[in-house]
Image (spheres, rainbow, N blue to C red):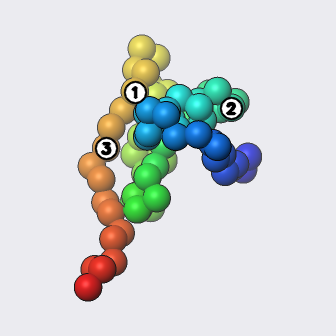
Amino acid sequence: MGVKYIARTTHEHAKAGNINNALKYAKGEFVSIFDCDHVPTRSFLQMTMGWFLKEKQLAMMQTPHHFFSPDPV
């Protein structure tokens, strides 16, 4: 699948810095970004990729978020 874990040794610009750094290594035509507690639905790719293939001018898409965060108490 070509999935990689990328970590930075510095922390400037927090999450935005992490995303910008990771995009330097992205090789695919399409990139998806998830947080560690983000749980995509089973149909995520089916529901999103069709729009990118149909609408050639589409550059970015945001979908509803589903999270998994166990109660810390």
- Residue placed under numbered mark 3 in the picture: 63
- Residue placed under numbered mark 2 in the picture: 25
Numbered circle sitting on residue 60: 1
Q: CA distance from mark 2 to mark 1?
A: 18 Å
Tag 2: Cα neighbours inside 10 Å, few (<14), some, or many (≥20)? few
Q: Residue 70 in the image: state x and y as whole percent.
A: 33, 78
Q: Residue 11 in the image: state x and y as whole percent.
A: 52, 40
How many labels were placed on the picture?
3
Q: In terms of secondary structure, where does tag 3 sit? A: loop
Q: Residue 40 in the image: state x and y as whole percent.
A: 41, 57
Instruction: Kindly identify the amino acid type of the residue bearing the numbered disc 2.
Output: Tyr
Q: In terms of secondary structure, where does tag 2 sit? A: helix
Image position of 29 (left or right of 46): right
| Whether residue 54 can be seen here | yes
Instruction: Kindly identify the amino acid type of the residue bearing the numbered disc 3.
Output: Thr
Q: Residue at x 42, y 14 (%)?
A: 57
Q: Residue at x 31, y 44 (%)?
A: 63
